[in-house]
Image: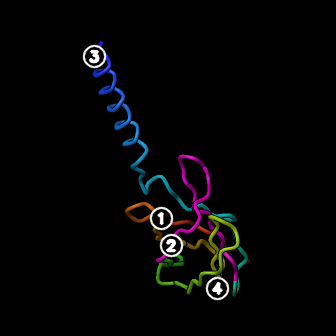
Amino acid sequence: MIQLSRTLRVALIGVAIIGSATFAFADVKNYEFRLVEPTVKAGPDRTIAVKLVDKTTGKPVPEAVIFATRLDMAPDAMQEMATKVTAMPVTEPGVYRFKATFGMAGRWQLSLGAKVQGETGTVENKLVIQADQ
């Protein structure tokens, strides 16, 4: 009887350790940015909204620290055609807005780098936005 309870105890401890290990380690590959709207009108002071999503749950990820932004026309082979991107205040959890000038119609690439709280590594995405006349 004593041997059985000791074995049961060891088994339960093993299950607890294995179970906690699978939930303790997430990966920055589980996160991605998605465009809220894939098109904008060409011109000054246009707003771009992106949502940072946990791909495993589909839920938005609030309070990420976005430290790298770049907007250029790399998809149309004009990466030297870059424009300034300005972060705007967050008004909805997990949705990040930026203001930029789209100097001409075409495909623009928004490159983002962010840190997610509690995760190691960097979430990096390149999103293509269509600017129309």
Please tell me which residue is depicted at 57% across the width and 57% down the height of the picture.
Answer: 53
Residue at label 2? 65
Q: Report which residue position mark 3 lands on.
A: 2
What's under tag 3, amino acid-wise? Ile
- How far from the left and from the top, in percent, is residue 73? 54, 76
Residue 12, compared with residue 27, is above or below; it is: above
Quarter that holds the C terminus: bottom right
Measured Cα–Cα span from mark 1 to mark 4:
30 Å
Could you give the CA–CA distance between mark 3 and mark 1, rounded to whole angstroms?
46 Å
Mark pair 4, 2: CA separation? 23 Å
Q: Which residue matches tag 1?
A: 117
Q: Are discs 1 and 4 less than 8 Å apart at CB?
A: no
Q: How crowded is the residue under tag 4: few (<14 C-alpha within 10 Å), some, or many (20+)?
A: some
Most foreground residue, 100 or 22: 22
Task: Identify the magenta region.
Answer: 46-67
- Camera-side mark, 1 or 4: 1
Q: Earlier in the sequence, mark 4 or mark 2?
A: 2
- Mark 1 Cα within 10 Å, few/some/many (few <14, many 20+)? few
What residue type is disc 2 on?
Val
Q: Residue 64 lies in magenta, yes or no?
A: yes
Measure the C-alpha gap from mark 3 to mark 4: 74 Å
- Residue 1 percent across, percent down from the top left: 30, 12
* Closer mark to the observer between disc 3 and disc 2: 3
Q: Does the magenta stretch include residue 28?
A: no
Question: Given this view, does label 3 or label 4 mark the residue nearer the observer?
Answer: 3
| Left or right: where 38 falls relative to 117 | right
Mark 4 in CB contact with mark 2 (< 8 angstroms): no
Whether the residues at callouts 1 and 2 have beta carbons within 8 Å, the answer is yes
Q: Give, as a three-letter code, the residue at label 4.
A: Thr
